[in-house]
Image (cartoon, rainbow, N blue to C red):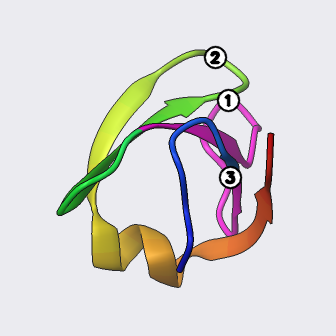
Amino acid sequence: MDIKVGDVLKLKKQHPCGSREWEVLRIGADFRLKCKGCGHQIMAARGKIEKSIKDIIRN
């Protein structure tokens, strides 16, 4: 997948705050994502995130 820093990922499952959109802050073996709803940041494995992507919103 062609994902770049600054892209917004729309995931299949929603965050507890209700948002499905996450901003990509860092890319590598793991992704650092920031929730667009509440600002919570997570680090998650690349494979897990790539499986759960529904849409990519380019900037």
Q: In the rendered view, tell whether residue 19 sits above or below residue 36.
A: below
Q: Residue 28 at what x, y percent from top left?
A: 23, 56
Dot 3 amino acid type: Gln
Q: Residues within 10 Å of mark 3 (few under 14, many from 20)?
A: few
Q: In the rendered view, tell whether residue 46 sits above or below residue 42.
A: below
Q: Residues within 10 Å of mark 1 (few under 14, many from 20)?
A: few
Residue interval drawn in magenta: 9-25
Q: Say which mark, if any, is on residue 17.
A: 1
Q: Residue 44 at what x, y percent from top left?
A: 28, 54
**Which residue sits at x=17%, y=63%?**
29
**How far is disc 1 from disc 3 in space, using C-alphas?**
8 Å
Does 11 lie within the magenta span? yes
Q: Residue 23 at what x, y percent from top left?
A: 60, 36
> Disc 3 on helix, strand or loop?
loop
Q: Residue under circle 2?
A: 38
Quadrant showing the C terminus:
top right
- Determine contact: label 1, label 2, CB under 8 Å: yes
The answer to which of 13 and 21 lies nearer the viewer is 21
Q: Residue under circle 3?
A: 14
The answer to which of 38 and 33 lies nearer the viewer is 33
**How far is disc 3 from disc 2 in space, using C-alphas?**
12 Å
- Determine contact: label 3, label 2, CB under 8 Å: no
> Disc 1 on helix, strand or loop?
loop
Image check: 32 left or right of 36?
left
Dot 1 amino acid type: Cys
Dot 2 amino acid type: Cys
The answer to which of 1 and 41 lies nearer the viewer is 1
Mark 1 or 2, closer to the camera: 2
**Which residue sits at x=66%, y=45%?**
7
Q: Quadrant of residue 36?
A: top right
